[in-house]
């Protein structure tokens, strides 16, 4: 894991494109671009369409246009959102007062009277949000399904008679709900086809459980084949598989860094990365989301000042980023991150949980998407839970790195081995993506996902919704803002047989509640058109079309570029 001197990728005169209304802190280049164009945009009340910006030094690192949109929250909407949360908070305190005097029944766990002098087991104030805000819209989450989580799902109907504190099943099934919530990017969550046949065969031979760790008697030949295949798929020397994606981050980062090391983490990194960084005992510093100026500033300060008090050089500097950010729909500026890590001789940890399989002409993640060398990423992490329709995660990189983790990773030493049917699902789907099954099905799924993503995002913008993220990201956040509209949107969509995920505070900033759509290669154009029609209908009903951008011309199917090797 040695570092070479800073090098620059030569990719011709590619223009960097940005939008008016993009937040300066979200875009490493937006600050300078915004200043340059401020005088031209002062006379406009609305955000403009995308414009080509003359090539800047960073643009030479990119082999393709990099377009992301984060339109500003309208001022009136922001004010009304804060007012909504304020009103809910006031009523929450009033209801807590009624519960305290037993006028209203309290359903949540609380201290017994006989333990009033004990140290509190439950932090009452910390549960305030759960009691008074989350419970109002709890019916939008944890919905049980009774089918394969494919392009359509069947839901078990449930009702609540105590304002979502408890639920009862009615015994009825809601069939044919279009699934816009699952991470089934390539459509491998299915109960027919070659993957299922292979899984059934392996289950009959090996069973379901291994009942041991990899270091004892749980290391199967299928595990060895999987790790060899993952390394070949990613173009690296070696790889290691783990049974849980969350633990792949939280248990391996502490094995890589420790006291005297510095972790530079994107502010929107997944909680598994945050937990792993905290468990490591390293010093953690956070840079603004996808902002290369903020990252470089922290790198410079780390090199110049060293460790606090002693000013000794850091033992190791690790930059931690994600390929696709699952709440923002944005893609990491990987060429710039790699250039910075080389310049300052840091290490790079790339989490490709959402991007592996979903990005790049060959479905091999952010590195493939930008046409970069996998050897420039020191630690490549990803999960099998999304594009591969399975479970678990992997770490890939140089052979020395993987050999070290096999001995020092808690997830490797103490965790039970991956289930053989799960391993076989990954192997079969990955070979399909690589074309090693003798068909072009995998390549077609990657192409279809890219086409569906562009089409869906384009149509939503035409309708007037505020959409976050990169044009090529299959994670599509649509802004709802107001707390009352979180529950209303989820319920109205389900009433029309569309299943969606809605997200609010504290998972997002308080004024940025949203619906998050996950596009799949399994979605047909008819399904997407049906979903878009319903979204537009509900958007009009709830007045969700907040965008102030000038609407683009009607969508042209021919505008979708083919994805080639």
Image: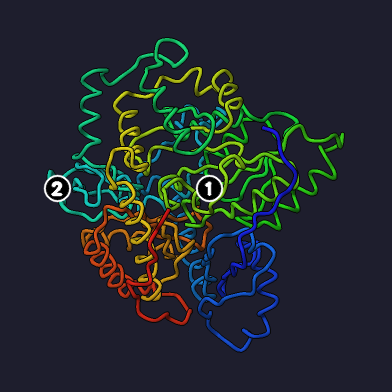
Q: Residue at x 48, y 67 (%)?
A: 81
Question: Measured from the top left, where is residue 180 in percent x and y?
Answer: 31, 55
Please tell me which of labels 2 and 1 falls first in the chain: 2
Q: Secondary structure at mark 1?
A: helix
Q: Which residue is the extreme one toward the left?
A: 172
Query: In 3D space, how far apart are the residues under numbered discs 2 and 1 (Cα atoms)?
Result: 42 Å
Q: Relative to residue 115, is residue 479 depicted above or below?
A: below
Q: Residues within 10 Å of mark 1 (few under 14, many from 20)?
A: many
Question: Measured from the top left, where is residue 439 in percent x and y?
Answer: 27, 44
Q: Which residue is mark 1?
A: 367
Q: Secondary structure at mark 2?
A: strand
Q: Relative to residue 268, is residue 69 depicted above or below?
A: below
Q: Relative to residue 469, is residue 398 depicted above or below?
A: above
Between label 2 and label 1, give the one nearer the viewer.
1
Q: Can you see residue 100?
A: no
Which residue is more in the foreground, 22 or 348?
348
Residue 369 placement, left or right of 556: right
Residue 59 placement, left or right of 315: left
Q: Can you see residue 381?
A: yes
Q: Quadrant of residue 517?
A: bottom left
Q: Residues within 10 Å of mark 2 (few under 14, many from 20)?
A: some
Which residue is more in the foreground, 332 or 289?
332
Residue 179 placement, left or right of 109: left
Q: Which residue is mark 2?
A: 173
Question: Measured from the top left, where is residue 440 in percent x and y?
Answer: 29, 47
Q: Quadrant of the N terminus?
A: top right
């Amino acid at each position: 894991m040695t570092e070479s001197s800073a090098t620059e990728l030569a990719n011709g005169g590619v223009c960097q494109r940005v939008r008016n209304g993009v937040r300066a802190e979200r875009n490493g280049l937006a600050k300078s671009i915004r200043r340059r164009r401020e005088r031209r945009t002062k006379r406009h009340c609305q955000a403009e369409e995308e414009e080509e910006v003359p090539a800047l030094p960073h643009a030479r690192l990119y082999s393709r246009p990099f377009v992301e949109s984060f339109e500003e929250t309208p001022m009136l909407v922001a004010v009304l959102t804060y007012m909504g949360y304020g009103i809910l908070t006031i009523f929450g305190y009033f209801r807590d007062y009624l519960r305290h005097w037993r006028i209203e029944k309290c359903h949540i766990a609380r201290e017994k009277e006989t333990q009033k002098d004990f140290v509190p087991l439950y932090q009452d104030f910390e549960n305030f949000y759960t009691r008074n805000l989350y419970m109002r819209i709890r019916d939008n989450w944890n919905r049980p399904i009774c089918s394969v989580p494919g392009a359509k799902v069947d839901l078990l109907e449930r009702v609540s008679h105590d304002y979502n504190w408890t639920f009862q099943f009615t015994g009825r099934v809601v069939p044919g709900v279009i699934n816009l919530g699952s991470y089934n990017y390539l459509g491998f969550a299915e109960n027919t086809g070659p993957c299922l046949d292979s899984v059934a065969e392996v289950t009959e031979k090996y069973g379901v459980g291994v009942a041991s760790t990899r270091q004892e008697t749980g290391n199967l030949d299928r595990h060895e084949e999987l790790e060899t295949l993952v390394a070949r798929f990613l173009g690296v020397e070696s790889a290691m598989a783990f049974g849980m994606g969350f633990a792949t981050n939280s248990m391996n980062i502490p094995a890589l860094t420790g006291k005297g090391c510095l972790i530079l983490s994107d502010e929107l990194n997944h909680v598994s990365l945050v937990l792993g960084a905290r468990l490591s005992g390293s010093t953690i510093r956070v840079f603004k989301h996808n902002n290369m100026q903020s990252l470089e500033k922290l790198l410079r300060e780390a090199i110049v000042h060293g460790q606090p008090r002693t000013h000794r050089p850091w033992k190791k500097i690790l930059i931690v980023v994600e390929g696709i950010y699952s709440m923002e729909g944005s893609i990491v500026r990987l060429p710039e991150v790699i250039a910075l890590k080389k310049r300052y001789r840091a290490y790079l940890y790339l989490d490709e949980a959402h991007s592996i399989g979903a990005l790049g002409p060959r479905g091999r993640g952010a590195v493939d998407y930008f046409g970069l060398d996998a050897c420039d990423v020191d630690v490549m992490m990803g999960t099998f839970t999304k594009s591969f329709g399975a479970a678990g995660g992997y770490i890939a990189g140089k052979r020395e790195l993987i050999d070290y983790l096999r001995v020092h990773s808690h997830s490797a030493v103490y965790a039970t081995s991956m289930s053989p049917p799960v391993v076989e699902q990954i192997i079969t789907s990955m070979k399909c993506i690589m074309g090693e099954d003798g068909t072009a099905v995998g390549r077609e799924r990657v192409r279809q996902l890219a086409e569906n993503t562009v089409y869906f995002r384009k149509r939503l913008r035409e309708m007037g919704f505020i959409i976050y993220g990169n044009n090529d990201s299959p994670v599509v956040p649509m802004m709802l803002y107001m707390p009352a509209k979180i529950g209303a949107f989820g319920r109205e969509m389900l009433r029309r047989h569309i299943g969606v995920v809605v997200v609010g505070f504290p998972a997002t900033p308080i004024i940025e509640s949203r619906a998050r759509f996950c596009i799949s290669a399994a979605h047909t154009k008819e399904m997407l058109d049906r979903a878009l029609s319903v979204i537009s209908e509900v958007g009009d009903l709830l007045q969700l079309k907040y965008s102030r951008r000038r609407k683009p011309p009607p969508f042209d199917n021919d505008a979708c570029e083919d994805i080639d090797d």
